[in-house]
Structures are given as C-alpha cells and as structure tokens.
Amino acid sequence: MHRPIRITCFLLLTILPAIGLAQGTQADYDRANSLRELTRNTVFRRKVEPNWAPDGKRLWYRIEVAPREFGFMIADVVAGTREPAFDNGELAKKLADATKKTVNAIHLPFQRLTIVDKEDAIEFSAFSGVWKYNRSNKELTRLRNAESANQKGNKKNTGQERDNSQEHRKSQDGRKSPDGKWDVFEKNHDLYVKSADSEDVAEVKLGKAGSGDDWYSDRHISWSPDMKTVVALRTRQGQQHDVSFVESAPKDQLQPKLHTHQYLKPGDRIPQSMPHLFDIESKIEIAVNNDLFSNPWMSTPRIEWSPDSSRFFFTYNQRGHQVLRFISVDAASGEARAIVDEQSETFIDYAYKQYLRILHGTGELIWMSERDGWNHLLPLRSLDRRS
C-alpha cells in the first residue's frame, strides 16, 4: 500500500470515531431533554423585584421559598439589613380572627403590600378591606374598605397622594394636559394641539406633516410637569418583506401548501419610533438632534421628565443590541447627551439584565451593567455627567 493511502486510511480511522462520539448518543439527548424536569422546583429565592417605600430607604419584595410557597422580605438599604416582613403564621391567624375566614399561612390572600412611611408597619388589601399591620407590636387594624377598580379609575388627585416616579409618569401621559388646558391629538397621521377650554378655538398642526408610513401617535404623549412642553413619538413603518415556505406533507390534503408571512431580515427597515419635542404655548417644534439614537430597536421608548421640567430622559437600545444609552434631552434647546453609554462587542442583554432607577431628589441614578463581565449595579451616577 502506498504511503499516502496508508496515511489517509489512518486519519479516517482516527477521525470517524471522534465524529461519532461528538454527535452524542440517544441517552445524551434524553438526559439533556430531561434537564428541565430535573431542576423543576429545586431553585428558590432566585428573583427579586424591588418595591420601594416612599422614604427611598426601604424596599420590599416577594420571593418563592418552596414550590408555590411565598414569603415577603423588607430590606433597609441604609442600614444594610434584610428580614422577613412578618411571620406568615402569626399574620394569618390574626387575619383569620379578624375576618372569621380561613387564611392559609402558605398562601396569604394578598401578593402586594405597602411600607408605611415613617412607621414600622405595612398595609395590604385582603377580604375587601385595607389592613395595617404594625411590625413592632404585631397589631392588625382594618383601615377602610378596599377600592374597586371603578373607584380607582375615578379617584381625583387630592395632592396628598405619594408622588413616586411611576405615579408621576402616569399623570403626565395622555392626550390632554394634566391641568386640562390643552388637548394634543393625532389626525390623519399628523399631530395637532388646541385649547381644551372651548370648542371654538382652532386646532394647530405641530411639526412636519406625517404620512401613512411615518406618523405621530397620540397614544404616546408625555407632558412636562409644568405643561409647557410635550414629547410625542413619531414612528416610521418597517418595510414589507414576505418570506414563503412549502409545507410538503399537509395533514388535510395530498398536495403541498405554500405559506407566506412577514419576516424582516438583517438590513431590512424595521419600525422605529423617535421622540419629538414641542413648545405648546408657541406651537413650534424644538429640534432634537438624534445622532445619539438614530437607529433604535423596535421597542417604544418610555419618556420620563425631571420634576423641574428642564429635561426628559429615555433609554435607547440600538438595533443589534450592542449599544444601550440613557439619554437626557434639554427641554429648552433640544440638546441630547448620553448620561450612560453602554457598548459591547458582542451583546447587551437589554431584556433581562437591565435596571434603571432615577433619584431625582439627589440628581443621581442607579444603572445595571455587565461592562466588566459581571452583572451588577453600578455605584450612583450623577445625572449631570457622562459615564
């Protein structure tokens, strides 16, 4: 046998078994497929969704401590302590005695609570009532009847409600200004404003005209707290890209079937929304340079204003998910700058590893980052500098 042939045969005999082993056996695949069942109901206390107290120093969260068994924790971020919010069995007994109903300590009749400001107490809703539980003396008190969904929807702002960021943002969103003076609305893809005090006042078009492929929406309106400016989103429609495939053996007929559906490919134009800023009193658009957020992913940005109405913020997720920025836009000039500029050569997990909290009282923010290879919260960053 010639030497080249012998070498070739030797290599084939060496490589082929390795290829077979690399493919895995049926037992390997069965073991891999059973991983979910092997780990089901074995990992607990794995998820924390913080809910902050009004003082900004404490938070509570609900955790799964066993299969379908939950507990509540309270953490004091200033003191650096964490403890159960209450003893489930003790609270269940007190609630059962007060309501003459059966209360399961493992499955308490509420999933949310509120930390009472400046007190070592919590409030929760259960059995059509709002209850207060003093953690110090273990006293349970019924405060009032729980509000129905209609009552919550019709409740007027008395000025005494807590002004956390989420509630404040909700009061800013909507067609009509919070003071009821102005109405911003979409008509024929364009954005208009008119006085809400009288039907006789003419409506005024804001910004450049839209079209069927590039339009404004009055579903995404965000008012500044002083109601002098408003941010509206203008969306450019993605392109139509039909992809077809053949179902060779359909169950209901002998002949193959052709299926076609919309599927965008890399490089195709995707739907993109951009914030536009308007001065309501002068009825003009304040130009915003979008160089820092020119190629957004399809998600709609959530606008949040500073309490003094001087600027608004949003998070920009660039298409391709390698750039994630926290943007600040000056309400007077339209100047945009990146407070946080997160960039990666591979991928930024924008969906499951992103956390942001703005602390307007101190002019700081908390930002979650993987820039050094580990996922953690960065130290407090100033809203007035780039990081």
Image (cartoon, rainbow, N blue to C red):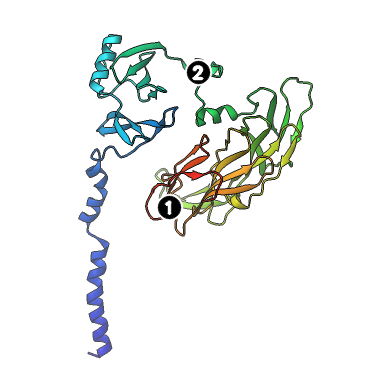
Please state which of residues 140 and 146 is positioned toward the viewer in this rendering: 140
> Is disc 2 placed on a helix, strand or loop?
helix
At 51% from the left and 31% from the top, the residue drawn is: 165
Residue 44 % position (x, y): 26, 38
Disc 2: CA contacts within 10 A as few (<14), some (14-19) or many (>=20): few
> Can residue 285 be seen from the camera position used here?
yes
Q: Which mark is residue 152?
A: 2
At 24% from the left and 38% from the top, the residue drawn is: 41
At 64% from the left and 36% from the top, the residue drawn is: 217
Query: Quarter of the image containing the N terminus?
Result: bottom left
Q: CA distance from mark 1 to mark 2?
A: 55 Å
Which of the 4 image quadrants contains residue 171? top right
Residue 311 % position (x, y): 62, 39
Please state which of residues 345 and 306 is positioned toward the viewer in this rendering: 306
Disc 1: CA contacts within 10 A as few (<14), some (14-19) or many (>=20): few
Label 1 or label 2, whichever lies nearer to me, is 2
Residue 77 % position (x, y): 37, 35
> Is disc 1 placed on a helix, strand or loop?
loop
The kind of residue on which mark 2 rests is Lys
* Residue sitting at the far bottom: 2
Residue 246 % position (x, y): 47, 52
Q: Earlier in the sequence, mark 1 or mark 2?
A: 2
- Which residue is disc 1 drawn over? 248
State whether residue 36 is above or below residue 163: below
